[in-house]
Amino acid sequence: MPNILMFQGTGSGVGKSVLATGFCRLLKNRGLSVRPFKAQNMSLNSGVTPDGLELGRAQIVQAEACGVFPDARMNPILLKPQGSGVSQLIRMGKVSCTCSAHEYYSLTEENFQVARKAFDSLKSESDWIVMEGAGSPAEINLQARDIVNMRMAKYAGAKVILIGDIDRGGVFAWLKGTYDLIQPQYRSLMQGILINKFRGDVSLLEPGIKQFEELVPVPVLGVIPWREMELEDEDSQNLRSKIDSEAVLDVAVIRLPHISNFTDFDPLKQIDGLSVRFVKNVNELGNAELIIIPGSKNTLADLAFLHEKGFTAELKNLCGKTWILGICGGFQMLGESVDDPHDMEAGGRGSGLGFLPMTTVLEGDKQLEKREYQGQNWLEGLCWSGYEIHLGRSEIRSNELESIVKNDASLGVIDRKQKIIGTYIHGWLESPEVTRRLLALVSPEPFDIPFSFQQTKEREMEELADFLEEYCDVESILRN
């Protein structure tokens, strides 16, 4: 029977995913077999397992921290919001249905059964399972339908560590309020508290901790200083630009309302001399030398956003002058039209940007694949890892466009005259060779590109594990 450690939080964005990742690596470094687990996740940032199944990006990163391949059992229930109050429900890595919130909650017991089965299977393979909750266990309107916080902790027999974010202010009120609002039968599961994102002199906080421990019978087992993290984030609410005051190249990523897989651009943030800005308004494009239209969970709705907010007109004005890159849903938008005849997303038909002689129909099963790709023409001689995760099939009605993927023009093309690139492949910018070719198109400046984005993540996970060893009472956290 493995040891079960679970991180829950006073709210979203307090650091649950990052701290769970850090403890995954910390335990791995102690020579232990570790697996991550999050019963239910809501995120538009997902990825593909080696066997072609979909799960939240945070659990993929946590699997990497454990030194194992990602597995759909690590995130058995995934919700991907599509707008208009509906979400795509993914069970064990496969699309189950599209449902409203009320419809989803009517499936609570079915989903909890799926989560329990996945957990039971996973726990037979490791010394430790590091679990992560969602939102807050004190959301009293959701407690009766909980499958990811205290109810899952009780089933798993987990030791729960509650995380509070002091940077937002009022951390003691958040922590006490959370403890008080947890159902009484679950309070004994809470064995420790971590105060995260602290800035300043910790001695000034210590009197408050002593007073707090008189009010709440749960010990504070660490005060973790603020630290910039370079790990991929699953929540677009935490999306941050990287502004370099000495940048020689400005990259603008259009922040679509339903933006997905936004961590595609994290490798660009690691390069000195580049600014990577997420922009919501057309006037923010400024003098960007590269404009990126990212992935989308609702391509037609986000295409309408481009039309209504003036992006379409400005992009047409810049076409042929400034390089424009579309990835996945952004690639579909570069074409002439996107048609959703079966209401798989928003339904209806929309005019594209018209940069590529291409039409897209949203139909059939979701394409899920993780593999190696070989380049041709512009990317001749390159081989890189990436993944596809999209609805729809695109038809390119021209032989004049250069395919950038060997034997399959539908996966990516380049139009050098119009300065347009489109691809369905996520993760391709993690290849330093692909990134080098892209930047060479855009700028004559040489850039020092990190040898491997994966190595950057590995370094960050090692430093995070050491950081937690320093600022947490790790032995008390791990003690049964």
Image (cartoon, helix red, strand yellow):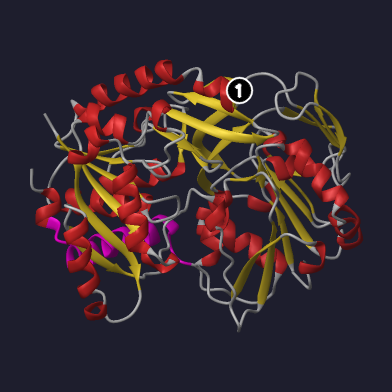
For image coordinates 42% across by 23% down, the residue present is 92
Q: Whole-percent x and y of residue 279?
A: 71, 62
Point out the residue furthest to the bottom here. Answer: 246
For image coordinates 65% across by 66% down, the residue present is 277
**Measured along the vertical axis of the image, is residue 27 above or below residue 105?**
below
**Measured along the vertical axis of the image, is residue 325 above or below residue 172?**
above
For image coordinates 48% across by 48% down, the residue present is 234
Which quadrant holds the N terminus?
top left
**Which residues make up the magenta segment?**
450-474
Q: Residues within 10 Å of mark 1 (few under 14, many from 20)?
A: some
Q: Whole-percent x and y of residue 27?
A: 17, 49
- Residue bearing mark 1: 99
- Tell whether position 457 is magenta: yes
Q: Nearer the viewer, residue 402 or 157?
A: 157
Q: Whole-percent x and y of residue 432?
A: 51, 59
Relative placement, left or right, of 413 versus 107 is right
Q: Whole-percent x and y of residue 93?
A: 46, 26
- Tell whether position 251 is magenta: no
